[in-house]
Image (spheres, helix red, strand yellow):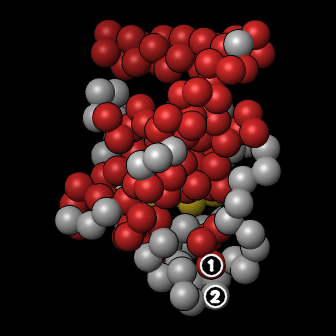
């Protein structure tokens, strides 16, 4: 219980810190995002966070990034390989943004900078996995067939997570 409470407090603190930094020190958040984006793997992970979870709470964004991270760890693939797996098939890939036919260029600067920060945090491996070691998730307004075959680990924001 203590570790779970500590991680919620930590995630809440990081979220508030980022919002304050973005509001009062935008150059600092841009510097963090721009420095990390030189790594193509961070960029791929940030794209997944941005397009799949930018409207979610900070904890939901972390959990989505952790799903990608967990897939990387179990499949011996890169972040880009995992994020864009099946992207050549219209509306039939692993992460819907990668094959929906829409632009994959971020247009909301603050949301993009937060996505890059989330990607950097998760890739570093220095944060406890709040997704319950999930390798799959979906929005709570859909019910894919595959979800019945997996173990539900948690619900965060509008996403349900499984392994």
Q: Is residue 8 left or right of residue 149?
A: right
The image shows residue 157, relative to residue 95, as above or below, that is above
Is 116 in front, or is 92?
Answer: 116
Measuring from the top left, give residue 74's x and y in whole percent.
Answer: 22, 60
Identify the image quadrant of the C terminus.
bottom left
Q: SS of the residue at dot 1?
A: helix
Locate the N terminus by quadrant. top left
Return the x and y of residue 71 as percentages of the image width and height: 32, 60
| Residue 24: mark | none
* Residue at the image position 55 percent from the left and 67 percent from the top: 95
Total numbered circles: 2
Crowdedness near tag 1: few (<14), some (14–19) or many (≥20) residues, C-alpha within 10 Å = many
Residue 98: horizontal and vertical position, in percent?
60, 72
87 lies above or below 132: below
Q: Residue at x 35, y 50 (%)?
A: 69
Instruction: Classify 5 as above or below 118.
Output: above
Q: Quadrant of residue 140?
A: bottom right
| Residue 159 percent across, percent down from the top left | 59, 49
The residue carrying pointer 2 sits among few (fewer than 14), some (14 to 19) or many (20 or more) residues within 10 Å by Cα, namely few
The residue drawn where x is 72% and y is 80% is 101
Secondary structure under badge 2?
loop
Compare residues 12 and 104 and report the one nearer the observer: 104
Q: Is residue 81 left or right of residue 30?
A: left
Q: Earlier in the sequence, mark 2 or mark 1?
A: 2
Query: Looking at the image, do the residues carrying marks 2 and 1 touch, with CB atoms under 8 Å apart?
Result: yes
Residue drawn at 42 percent across, 49 percent down: 39
Gap between marks 2 and 1, in whole Å? 5 Å
Name the residue carrying label 1.
99
Report if residue 163 is visible in the image: no
What residue sits right under mark 2 in the picture? 90
- Residue 62 vertical position relative to residue 49 in the rendered view, above or below: above
Quarter of the image where one finds residue 102: bottom right
């Amino acid at each position: 219980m203590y570790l779970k409470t500590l991680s919620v407090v930590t995630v809440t603190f990081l979220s508030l810190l980022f919002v304050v930094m973005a509001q009062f020190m935008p150059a600092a958040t841009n510097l963090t995002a721009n420095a990390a984006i030189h790594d193509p793997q961070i960029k791929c992970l940030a794209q997944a966070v941005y397009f799949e979870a930018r409207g979610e709470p900070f904890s939901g964004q972390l959990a989505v990034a952790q799903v990608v991270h967990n897939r990387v760890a179990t499949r011996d693939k890169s972040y880009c390989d995992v994020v864009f797996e099946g992207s050549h098939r219209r509306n039939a890939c692993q992460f819907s943004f990668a094959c929906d036919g829409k632009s994959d260029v971020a247009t909301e600067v603050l949301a993009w900078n937060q996505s890059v920060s989330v990607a950097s945090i998760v890739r570093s491996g220095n944060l406890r996995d709040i997704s319950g070691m999930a390798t799959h998730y979906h929005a709570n307004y859909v019910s894919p067939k595959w979800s019945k075959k997996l173990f539900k680990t948690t619900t965060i924001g509008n996403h349900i997570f499984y392994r």
